[in-house]
Image (cartoon, rainbow, N blue to C red):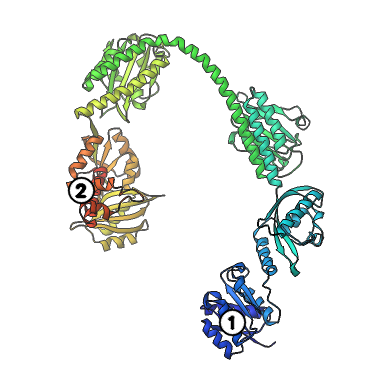
Amino acid sequence: MEQRQVLYVGHDADAAAPLADALDAVGLPTSIHHADTAAEAVARCGREPVGCVVADTATIGEPQSFLEALRSRVPELPVVWLSDQSAEMVADTLGDGPTDYVYNHASAGVATLLAHRIRSLLDGGAARTGQYDRTLEQCEAIVKSVQDGVCILDSNMDFVFVNQAFTELVGYSEAELLGANAALVTDGDDMETARQRRAKLFEGDADPAILSGELTTESGDRVPVETWMTPIELDGGENGTVGVVRDLSYRKRTEAMFTALYEAAHDLLSAHSQQEIADIGVEAAASTLGFEDAIVFSYDAETNVFRPLAHTPGAEDNFSGMPSIDASSTSLSGQAFFESEPIATADMSQLSAVYDPKTPYRRAIFTPIGEHGVLLVADTEVGTTADQTLTVAELLGASLAAAFGRLASERRFEAHKEALADRTAELEAMTHTNELVGELVDELLAASSREEIEEAVCSVLAGFARFVWIGAAESRSDTIVPRASAGHDEGYLDWLADHTAHDHSESAEPAARALETNALVSVDRISEDWQTAQWRKEALSRGYQSVFSVPLTYDDITFGVLTIYAGTRGGFDEYTRAVLAEFGRLIAYVIECTETKRGLLADRRTEVELDITDGDDLLYDLAAALGTTLCFEGVVPQRGDHSLLYFSTDASPDGIEAAAADTPAVESVRVVTTQPDATLFEATVSGPLLAETLVDCGAIPTRIETDGNRQQVVVTIPQTTDVRTVIDRLQVEYPSTTVVSRRDRDREILTQSTFRMQLLDRLTPRQQEALRAAYFARYFESPRGSTGTEVGESLGISQPTFNYHLRAALRTLLTTLFEDRTATTLDS
């Protein structure tokens, strides 16, 4: 075959290479030449034997002018336009004669489409630029992109095209459908409707026709469908239509199922017994889920079995005798109920561990009904269950659970009404307690010190009890020290001081147990088993018959324990205990407020100095590798077992980086700040750290210095944590741990106002001004309400100056918030 010459006009010369390969693939030997501009292309067509021109419309400018120039040199020269616009938008610019068009973003491949167009033109065939060719391309794209059925009907409504999805929908093969009339799968009424809508489409109706009806499958089944029909011009100008057919079976079934489910839920609202609820559930399951049988089982908690409550008539034949089912892991009902998850099985006989050979059921769903039972739907045939059916079963189970729950709530309400009547009778007995409350509140408001508060409480409560006292734990031992008392002591507190230390068992004296557990302790009958506990004997000998201990705790701070002894059994009813428990918190609150007001409240802590010469610690290993001293500055835990470790040293950064590179547990290290005497480093590390171990043990690391031979550690232990316990736990990880010294320190607890005062004292006026202006100008919002430049202009300063003052203020704020040491930091 004679080799042809094709001229490609466009800025992208590389685009011509794929075109040459595509032309070879379609059997058209061709040489490809390139012209960068329209003028160059026109000139070359005048002097070279160009057989066809491929022109990128984005390059040549005005297509009509370009085409006229080409045809003036070579009449009837074939031209293929390559455009980023659709065929409809460029139809007026294609021109007369042998021209064609290719969309530059066609999914089938631009080079391949161009090759076919060029071959058609060079072989003498007229370019197929009509609506038919373009519509077929559109139909091809639709067929590839949708999963619905697609068919094309000619003017007689005969099938000329069907896709695989359509053949699967109607059950006929493609060969059986092509050439057959649509009446093969459509009844008379739907055919007439389709004809009328097609006529409107052919008359120019711009909107697609949307038809709803049914198709008759090869097996005679009726399938509900929705068809979107648009006109198409077939070969020879014949009118036709392309239809996208969607199967509505799933939607119809879903609508029917949810309609029945809604009606069942509505009926359940008016059900007034468990039997009525179960009957509605069975009826709804039978009508919506499509199984042979449905059974509602109620759970009997006393015997741990499921008992049939309601069932469909056929269930008696398949589930002979309607026996109860054991609620254990060997039953699917038990598994679904206790796991609160439905279980669907295609064939129960395959589940040997739970299958009962006596039942003919195979396919089944076991749906939990909350805490009330299980809904079983089952077939005697093997089969799978659709996700939609399982969802509806879950919804039905939830509706039944809500109905059973509502019924239970109504019954509880009735019982509550009866209880209220009993409660009314008890109110008279509470009068004395309420009078006591009023008197106690008056005394608390009048007290001006902790001692006055404690004495007033004991004095008031002794008016209705035999003996009252308030004690607090001694910081260095487990002894409870009395702070105030009233009533008939008769030496009981003296005995208690000698016998309660280290005894926090269940048989321990109530005050000790309440203080240890920070929980209420009530003993209604001290005389019960009095031989087993010495305190009971001592209490009985002094006329104490019952006791109630209340921890005095507010905002996680315990101020002691209030213990009241009554001269009668059961001297503290539920109401009295509740009132005293609330007053325990109130008393603690008043003490806290009074102590704060007087400036007497101190946070007692124990400072312990330790020496450690062994153990696994990254800082210790780095110091040993460097042969220098490293000082711990802080640690920030990260995700997983990673942490940000901050330490300072006078060693060179190069030495630190080299040692870190040789340490697998160090992922990265960087210099934070450099001072004349030390450098602060940040390292991303993994593995054990002494600082984190100290925190886990309940201690706060204040100072850690290590030279690789030993670690000198100073920790602070709050008063709420036992020092001996901390040391014992630490020695498990670091056996060489020794205590060098121990000191008790009182540290002022900052309230919100004192913290603010301290912060303002540390800020310069300019820093306060910058911080306030940034806050009120919404500088810290996201997005920001004002920029740094804008805030600086408001203050009459430049942005760098504003940033300087703001950073200084924030550093002071964070230092005040996070620092718990008096030593000067590297940034100070």
Sequence-wise, the earlier of marks 1 and 2 is 1
Cα distance in 3D space between marks 1 and 2? 77 Å
Location of residue 62 in the rendering, given as x and y in whole percent from the top left corner: 54, 76
Secondary structure of the residue carrying tag 2 is: helix
Residue 630 at least partly seen:
no
Which of 148/651 is in front?
148
According to the image, label 1 marks what residue? 68
* Quadrant housing residue 674: bottom left
Which of 487/622 is in front?
487
Would you say 359 lies left or right of 627 here? right
User: For the residue carrying disc 2, how many other residues have a C-alpha within 10 Å: few (<14), some (14-19), or many (20+)?
Assistant: many
In the rendered structure, find residue 767 and report the number of the disc placed on it.
2
Q: Residue at x 20, y 53 (%)?
A: 796
Toward the front, the furthest residue is 203
Amino acid carrying mark 2 in the image: Gln
Secondary structure of the residue carrying tag 1 is: helix
